[in-house]
Image (cartoon, rainbow, N blue to C red):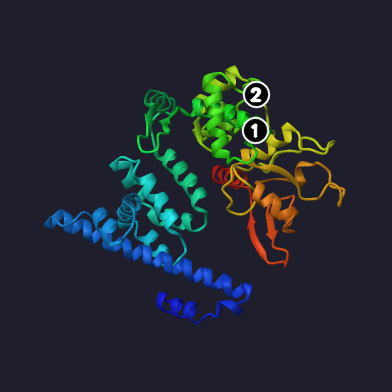
Amino acid sequence: MSPVDRLRRLHALGIDAASSREVASALRDITSRRGWSAAKEAERARRQHELAEAEGAAPAVDALHRGGRRSRRDAQRTAERAAALADAPAMTSLLEAGRVSTEHADVLASELGKLEATERATLLDDERSVAMTAAGLSPERFRRDLQRTIREQRDDDGLERSEQQRDEAQITLRLDEASGMGEIRGQLHPDDYQRMQRRVDAEVRALQQLPAHRNRTRAQVAATALVNLVCGARSTARPRPELSITVGLAELTGADRAARFGEYADGSPVPVETIRRHACEADIIPVVLGGDSMPLDVGRARRLATRAQRHALRSMYRTCAVGDCAASFERCEVHHTLEWSAHHGETDLAHLVPLCSYHHHRVHEGRWQLDLDTASRQLTVRYPDGTIQSTSVPDLLAERRSNDHRVA
């Protein structure tokens, strides 16, 4: 269906009498129309850039900022998207068709912007495959997949890159004269970031139990938590160092054709060399995998999930189990798909999934229905009327099985 036909259908829809199916169809039409508009905007931004180079016309960012009546930051993002789409015709076509969103295009632009010219060219050699991958993933998962593809392309040594990151770490402190507020910006080595995040999270959880902080946002409480930790006024006991890293045995032992990266609990990559170093100085918490790459059951004799079960779940899920939800596993609660009281569900790994607070409330108070296939871990989520909200499998489990198949 052409963009004009979709626009006509939207215009003809009587929204006050529309059914759920018609509203869903209208939203798809809007998404398609938005993608088409974004692709056309990118074409015009590219042309403006050509005119600026050849004739001294206004730069594309200025034209977008003034003519498009948008913020300069948004105009800059649009110009970067246009530059990326110029080299990715397949992504442009999918954007026009509404099969990918502007967020997917922005992910591509962001990751391309970090690459050297030769790396960029290598990635774009098969840009149709990149575009088709984007069409099947949420923007957040597409970013992770693209980052993994880029890591696999690189020939540089993982340890050398890790040391380079340590040298590049920096923190900037400044006072905003307009607001009078202090600002902290910086980049940390992944190891340092993980350690700091765990301590800030622990302090936030402790502060949120205090009446003075219960009505504050998490970001506001996190600011207090950071100050407490830096200034020595923290509310929590010092947490025992524990670092959760997911890595295959082949990677850890250096087997042929093994991947060169594992990942931290929040999904960020970590070189295998760094993991081996951690293994020398940390308690090892093993998650044993079966022949189908599925974590084995690790306990069932209690109401709440055990630490071992959470580690097993983390080896399958980076995020909330529902569809394309991007909430990190660390922010999730473990849910029994067979309810403990009503269905006498056991605390068995086969019946546990991680859910973010939003989706956990939708399941209990909102009466959403979950159907978990214990063999494949495919989770089907339905609204109270039976309509399917999403069907998905754990991303890490799917990747592991794909890698196992490719190696075989």
**Which secondary structure, mark 1?**
helix
Q: In x, y percent, where is residue 70?
A: 33, 57
- Give the quarter of the figure containing the C terminus: top right
Residue drawn at 63 percent across, 59 percent down: 390
Q: In x, y percent, where is residue 76?
A: 31, 50
Identify which residue, 231 or 114, lies in the foreground.
Answer: 231
Query: Spatial distance from mark 1 to mark 2, Cα to Cα?
Result: 9 Å
Identify which residue, 131 or 387, lies in the foreground.
Answer: 387
- Give the quarter of the figure containing the N terminus: bottom left
Residue 167, label in figure: none
Compared with residue 121, is residue 261 higher up or lower down, i.e. above or below? above
Q: In x, y percent, where is residue 304?
A: 79, 38
Which numbered disc flags the more N-terminal residue, 1 or 2? 1
Q: Is residue 11 left or right of residue 44?
A: right
Compared with residue 195, is residue 11 higher up or lower down, i.e. above or below? below
Residue 236, located in which quarter of the rendered image?
A: top right
Task: Work out whether residue 382 can be spotted.
Answer: yes
Residue 403, located in which quarter of the rendered image?
A: top right
**Amino acid beneath label 1:** Arg
**Which secondary structure, mark 2?**
loop
Hey, which residue is sitting farthest bottom in the picture?
Answer: 12
Is there a contact, CB below 8 Å, between mark 1 and mark 2?
yes
**Amino acid beneath label 2:** Thr
Task: Work out whether residue 372 can be spotted.
Answer: no
> How many residues crowd around disc 1 within 10 Å: few (fewer than 14), some, or many (20 or more)?
some
> How many residues crowd around disc 2 within 10 Å: few (fewer than 14), some, or many (20 or more)?
some
Residue 236, label in figure: 2
Residue drawn at 33 percent across, 66 percent down: 40
User: Which residue is label 1 attached to?
Assistant: 205
Q: In x, y percent, where is residue 225?
A: 57, 29
Q: Is residue 62 left or right of residue 120?
A: left
Identify which residue, 45 or 290, lies in the foreground.
Answer: 45
